[in-house]
Amino acid sequence: MNVGCVILACALLLVASSGSKAGQTLKAPCRPGFSQNFYTVIVSRDVLHGKSVLKDTTLSSERVKFEDCQRSREVGFVSSDPNFSVRPDGSVYAEQELANLSEPVQFMVTARGFHDAHIWETTVKLALAGHPHPIALTKGGIEEMLSRAWDSQPRVIKFPRKHQRGSSSNGLRRQKRDWVIPPINVPENSRGPFPHMLVRIRSDQDKAAGIRYSITGAGADQPPSGIYNIDPISGNMFVTQPLDREERASFHLRAHAVDMNGNQVENPIDLYIYVIDMNDNRPEFQNQVYNGSVAEGSKPGSSVMQVTATDSDDSTTANGMVRYRILSQTPHSPIPNMFTINSETGDIVTVAAGLDREKVSQYTIIVQATDMEGNLNFGLSNTATALISITDINDNPPELTVRTFSGEVLENKVNVVVTNLTVVDRDQPHSPNWNAVYRIVSGDPSGHFAIRTNPITNEGMLTVVKAVDFEMNRAFMLTVVVSNQAHLASGIQSSLQSTAGVTISVQDVNEPPVFPVNPKMIRFEEGVPAGTTLTVFAAQDPDHFIHQIVRYSKLSDPANWLKINRTNGQITTMAVLDRESMYVRSNVYEATFLAFDNGSPQASGTGTLQIYLIDVNDNAPVLIPRESQVCERARPNSRVNITASDADADPNVGPFVFELPSFPASVRRNWTISRLSGDYAQLRLRIPYLEASVYEIPVIVSDSGNPPLSNRSVIRVKVCPCDDNGDCSATGAVAAAGLGTGAIIAILICIIILLSMVLLFVVWMKRREKERQAKPLLIDPEDDVRDNILKYDEEGGGEEDQDYDLSQLQQPESLDHIISKPAGVRRVDERPVIAESQYPVRPSLPHPGDIGDFINDGLRAADNDPTAPPYDSLLVFDYEGSGSTAGSVSSLNSTSSGDQDYDYLNDWGPRFKKLADLYGGGDDD
């Protein structure tokens, strides 16, 4: 049959490779693409050219349906088999004879947007009626399908040419449309062999001249390079390695044809290579463990959580379409299937009622995600865990453990716990649904008690907040109601056990006596005499049911003015009450008294007595200042301002009356006083001039008491000459101080006499010093070698004297080891054993002139003391060596020569007496 548009007149049976799961309650969101991923069409052998194979004219299932969610997308369809084409309306047409269709034909239909880069694919399989059943949609069937798709690629792709056809009469020519190069489909993960031929590129001019073919683009000469290559002579195009659609889903290459000189023979053609997806990736959950929650008592259909899994395969094909299902639920209470999951969205919802946190607080759900639209036969799966916590609602009212509680409390005690109210609540601990709130609804009208909640145990601590009195109430009967911080859930009623009674017994204690009025205020005039009874400050014993005796004592009386009767509390004065005392504050004097009973144990109470002292005019006013100064000549500013003060209170104070006494008469003759205001007056000179001096001016001041009190005060006023500024001059100040000329002369004479005495004493001391220095000594100080220690270096005994023992030359610290030493050669100063000489005693307060005499007497006594070192004894030295080149000292002889006079040795004192006898010719040997 000629090539044409032949409709395949047949009964169409469209079977999707996998449909949506039956029983879906939720509509899947709109997803652009083909309605099915695989179409199977059974056609009759009676095939006519130009007839529609698949045509979507009724939008029914007998179509290749493409879903456009935007309703404005322009999409073009391309078939991978050149024997078939797809019109824009979705109709699939055969381009040539199909009568010899001996086996099913499978090809890909690709949809591409004109204005974007999105690509969608579906597979169409044609089988003749009466042909064996299509290949099963199993793993082997899919591999066979892909191999056939691989083998069904167009074998030859020609460069498009423009053909011309002549018109019959008017010479018009009709141009044939260019060829549409179908895309090349290559399945991913192919096992080869490689390189595998895809298509052949050829030009119509390859017979006339030698043509060289090449391809360019990503995958050929651009990264990733080397995936595709072409035989430059034959034009065979190969793929050299397995492809991975997840790495790159499509390639865009350009084929070129040039002659032997490199001249372009054909226009480049575009080659689109699509990697056919295989189901080689499992769905992956975003989390391995999901946490969700739902309130207990939730109705069926309540949303719990959502799990999400993604598949790296093509999401427009079944390989990337994930479906969810629940594998297991733990525990199976109250039923094994408390939850369900939306297979497409992963939303988990409840399907049954009966969630109770108090029975099951958490469910563990194993969720499985499977691709291939959930087909378990050949889809890949993965699992995740969903932990569903059942949140608490206040569906359990608190219940008191007993219907009646009891406790006891001592009277007058506060902030003590009487009893603990225990409660049971099965809701979530330490939540508003569990926290208890206690209320006293009856039995405590005065508010003696309050209930505080223990935040840890949830117990109610019944506490005394206002002291109870045994004499008033011996027992209390309270009614207590407990509730939660949160309101009970809808439909939950309060329990009868939420109410209980509390019996409280009050224990009597010995209470201290109480002063009915405390503090007690009384009013008295100051100055009441000692022994006056002020009041009776008695206390009462609150223990009415016990007869006890109350006694009193004074606790605090700062001025020691009061005393209290021990038995009846009568207050009596011991001294005159003085309002002006330092112990009185704001006219009130306070004293504290103690009242105690004879109970066991003894109790005591204190009371304060406040005495308001009414002022009487018992203090005369006084004047300040007591001293001042004015100029000797009357001037406007030469005056003295006087202020009167009174220790009493109003009305026994000002205004004051100031006046000068009539005696002596000179006071009123020289001075005048005038009142400036109630408390102030001014004293000034009456005469133009008054001699400079100090004047004592009496002033009489009287207060306004009834009767008034007066006081005669003396003001010392210094009258002095003043300078131009009205200030007293220095000379005037001295004169005003009362020192006359004679007094000043007397003071100067005394100063001169004192200086003369000091000078005479200094002269006398100088003279005594000169006399002491002029008195001669017994010997010349330069020749006096007494009490001098001369240390010389040890120089040894010569070259042959090297074995001497220096320890024998040292002065020993003790004589014991020498005394016990055997007789022999030794060196020691032996002190004579005789009575010691008596030295003069220095007086405790010596006169300076006696110091020289004392020294001379002491020196004389030391010279005549034979027990004082150095001792006149034989000194024997140890052997100092032999064979010295120096001569012996013993060879030196002492000879007398008349040329030398040794008489001066007699003047050196007793220590040189023997030497003087030896050389001076004395009688003593």
Image (cartoon, rainbow, N blue to C red):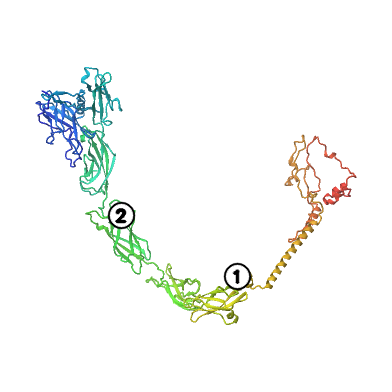
Judge by depth and name the residue closer to the eye, 36 or 139: 36
Judge by depth and name the residue closer to the eye, 291 or 463: 291
Which numbered disc covers residue 793?
none
Q: Residue furthest front?
A: 170
- Residue 715 vs residue 868: left or right? left
Q: Is residue 816 above or below residue 520?
A: above
Q: Amino acid at mark 2?
A: Asn
In primary-sequence order, the first of circles 1 and 2 is 2
Q: Which residue is tagged 2?
A: 435
- Residue 99 vs residue 465: left or right? left
Q: Can residue 86 be seen here?
A: yes
Q: Quadrant of residue 423?
A: bottom left
Q: Amino acid at mark 1?
A: Asp
- Residue 767 vs residue 293: left or right? right
Q: Is residue 615 above or below residue 2?
A: below
Position in image of residue 327 (x %, y %): 23, 39
Q: Quadrant of the N terminus?
A: top left
Q: Which residue is tagged 1?
A: 723
Q: Quadrant of residue 34?
A: top left
Categorize mark 1 by other alpha carbons within 10 Å: few (<14), some (14-19), many (20+). Answer: few
Judge by depth and name the residue closer to the eye, 159 or 886: 159
Position in image of residue 265 (x %, y %): 24, 21
Q: Is residue 234 above or below residue 525?
A: above
Position in image of residue 882 (x %, y %): 79, 36
| Mark 2, secondary structure of its residue | loop
Judge by depth and name the residue closer to the eye, 122 or 536: 122
Q: Nearer the viewer, mark 1 or mark 2?
A: 1
Q: Can residue 620 be seen here?
A: no
Real-space Cα separation, disc 1 to disc 2, in angstroms: 94 Å
